[in-house]
Amino acid sequence: MARQRKSARPADPMAIARRRAAERLAERDPATWGVNEAAMSLAANAAAVARSSPPGRRPNVRRQDAFDCLVARGGLSRGALEAVRRLQDDIAVLHRTLAGGGDFAPRIDRSPDPQSFTDARRRAGARIEAALALAGPASARLLVALCESEAVLGRAADWRAVVAAHTAERLPDAQGAVLRAACENLAGAYATIDRGRARAG
């Protein structure tokens, strides 16, 4: 006795077209994209770290620098990291140019006149000078060498080579300690500046 085949309902062409259109739309939506594993395995992305994100949100990929590495090892305080980021932001403002193809520098100095580009750079330079003067000459030289390479050249310097060049320190653990001390000195400098502003204001 032959088995009877179940009669399949004929597919609705409009339902198929809607489903395919929804799939194409989802492929074009950046929110559905994940991290490109082939790109992450390239040598140029050795310092990039993919961070997990809540479901429904894009994964976060961030390029780590020497300061992120020190925080990850538990050797740099949150205040010192914030001080370094503050210095990096001002250095980015100081070195950006109007002739560049795009302005990727953070907008931390919002002037009432958007055309006063030189004023924004001048104020950033004054903030850098004040903070570095209080941090001390050795810390200032080291931090400027590390932060300016990324702002000007667009790539992070080999921080161990920079520490060795500026301090003649060759031991890896001691190099980390020297950089941590410079960052803490910078945090102290910014704390002094902020206290002075609070008293004045």
Image (spheres, helix red, strand yellow):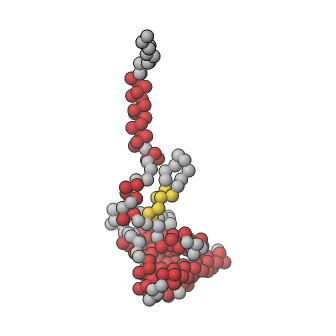
Residue 133 in the image: above or below residue 194: below
Residue 103: quarter of image: bottom left
Residue at image point 47% right, 47% down: 31
Q: Position of residue 23 (x, y in %)?
A: 41, 36
Give the quadrant of residue 162.
bottom left
The correct choice, above or below, for 89 with respect to 138 in the image is above
The foreground one among 97 and 16 is 16
In the rendered image, residue 87, in percent from the top left (x then y), is placed at 50, 74
Q: Is residue 25 above or below residue 7?
A: below
In front: 93, or 51? Answer: 51
Residue under the point 40% across and 59% down: 40
Is residue 36 toward the left or the right of residue 60 in the image? Answer: left
Residue 121, visible in the rendered structure: no
Residue 77, visible in the rendered structure: yes
Residue 138 location in percent, x, y? 49, 87
Residue extending furthest toward the top: 1
- Residue drawn at the location 54% of the way across and 47% of the way down: 55
What number of labels is visible? 0
Q: Residue furthest front?
A: 1
In this orientation, which residue lies closer to the viewer: 166 or 93?
A: 166
Name the residue rendered at 43%, 66% in the picture: 47
- x and y percent of residue 134 in the render? 55, 84
Locate the C terminus by quadrant. Answer: bottom right
Q: In the rendered view of the protein, which quadrant contains the N terminus?
A: top left
